Amino acid sequence: MKQHPLIHKFKTVANHYVYDVNTNNIVRTNEILHDVIDGYGTIPFSAIASKWAKKYDAKSIEQCLTHIQESCKSQGVFSSNRPTVMKYPMCEHHFYESLQGGLSDLTLNATERCNLRCKYCTYSGAYYYERHHSTEDMSWETAKKAIDYFYSHTQSSEKVYMSFFGGEPLLNFDLVKRSVEYARGFANWPPIVFHLDTNGTTLSDEISGFLIENDVILQVSIDGPFEIHDRYRVFGNGGGTFHLVHKNLERIRKMDRDYYESRVSFAATLAPPCELLETYRFFSSDDLVAKNNLNINFVDTYDTDFFRMLHDRVRRSRLSEHLGALRKEYLEVTVGSNSGPAHQFLKGLFERPLVRIHRRALNPMGAHCPPNGICVPGVRRLFVDVAGRFYPCEKVGQAFCIGHVDTGIEHPKVRSLLEQYIHGSTQDCTSCWAVRLCSLCLAQARRSRDLDFGRKKDNCSVERANLHDSLVLYAEIMERNPKAFDFVEDMVFE
Ligand code: SF4
Ligand code: SF4
């Protein structure tokens, strides 16, 4: 079958480019190649020449097509080769070996209770397919079994992470405390890092003292200045939480400034109407948050009617105006500095796909492609719910159960989940230009507790649009400063 080159074309103000999937290269081209390459490989040269006869003379078109042909033969660029098989780059033996001893991240769902009723919460009832808030806690017996399992499956890991997740995990502080103390008691364990996600409202002196003493990395949810934060992050009576969280943070900082600066980070959920400039101003100027690490997520607007009123055309155009302004600022800072942009907020909005693009391996693709960005369930990470069931990670919640604290990881379930994902993805992914850069995983292919490839397709469009924008931004930055991403070499990826 005749196929067109597996490429993606994009432009900056100054140049035309092709992202070439087979070589994983970004090739600077010109306008004529940009136009004529669409028909290359699928229709005769003569048909391409007549299609573009009004814009280019016949000789230029022929020279360009010959150049494409020769580049393809000599360097493999502009090739129409597609991968034929999607598979994890891991042999059967390595797969089972990793399931035995490669765990490095355990997340305990300490409780499903929460003292807040954030309006955009996954468990608020606003999402058609998600569970509601519940009153279930994880028992100590379950936590202990999960930690024992984790301990006996980390032999090949150099560092291990134990995280606590909710609801609000600090509502089950006894379990958090006991788990940390228990895990600390194991001899011969690789260095262990504790991590806890909190809404920041329950950080009493006792709890804060414990977290500081045990060097627990704390991620506190805070969405911006109080008028933005309190729009959604509220108690059951509708009262806002910003001032309480702020006061608690101030107290921790007073208790131990070093801990506060190095171990406390923030998670901001950007929800419609997404006042990005106001949010950026807050995170870059409020003395209590400006220097700490920050994770940014856009709220999930799928499978809910909740945001419909706030997501109209006017607001969307304001959002893209704000994004445009921040993109410009990110670009200018990155062009001018070899140590990355100045603020975490800008990094959170733009940097992750740029780093992925910069780090891509410049090798030929071959016949295999990986199953997008998914990790093999149960190999590195494990999420344990309040009842002791195992799941691939907290991002998929209680979807895709792969075992239990009493029985361990059930290998056939892992194998079957991977096979289903690959089976449902192969046709689209093996002909998709994003296949070597794509970060989609099980979390974007899930509806309720099942794999849903319709949902995944919707996310594919978003992923490709984001990758297109990122390629343009990457090229714009590299045109002005080819060393702008040298800082990536020093980044530690865990
Ligand atoms: S703090 Fe978290 S779990 Fe609790 S309501 Fe808010 S988003 Fe949901
Ligand atoms: S964007 Fe979709 S089709 Fe393309 S590689 Fe990613 S998952 Fe596959």
Image: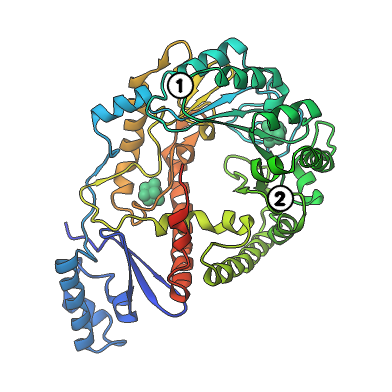
Q: CA distance from mark 1 to mark 2?
A: 55 Å
In primary-sequence order, the first of circles 1 and 2 is: 1
| Mark carried by residue 14 | none
Q: Position of residue 131 (x, y in %)?
A: 61, 26
Q: Position of residue 326 (x, y in %)?
A: 62, 65
Residue at the location (16% across, 77% down)?
66
Of residues 126 and 328, the one drawn nearer to the viewer in this rendering:
328
Is residue 402 visible in the rendered image? The answer is yes
Displayed quadrant of residue 221: top right
Is residue 221 visible in the rendered image? The answer is no
Q: Amino acid at mark 1?
A: Asn
**Vertically, is 6 above or below 174?**
below
Q: Amino acid at mark 2?
A: Met
Q: Position of residue 173 (x, y in %)?
A: 70, 21
Residue at the location (27% across, 30% down)?
94
At numbered mark 2, what does the secondary structure look like: helix, strand or loop?
A: helix
| Mark 1 or mark 2, whichever is nearer to me | 1
Residue that mark 1 sits on: 188
Q: Position of residue 63 (x, y in %)?
A: 19, 83
Displayed quadrant of residue 280: bottom right
At numbered mark 1, what does the secondary structure look like: helix, strand or loop?
A: loop
- Whether residue 253 sits left or right of residue 125 in the image: it is right
Residue that mark 2 sits on: 309
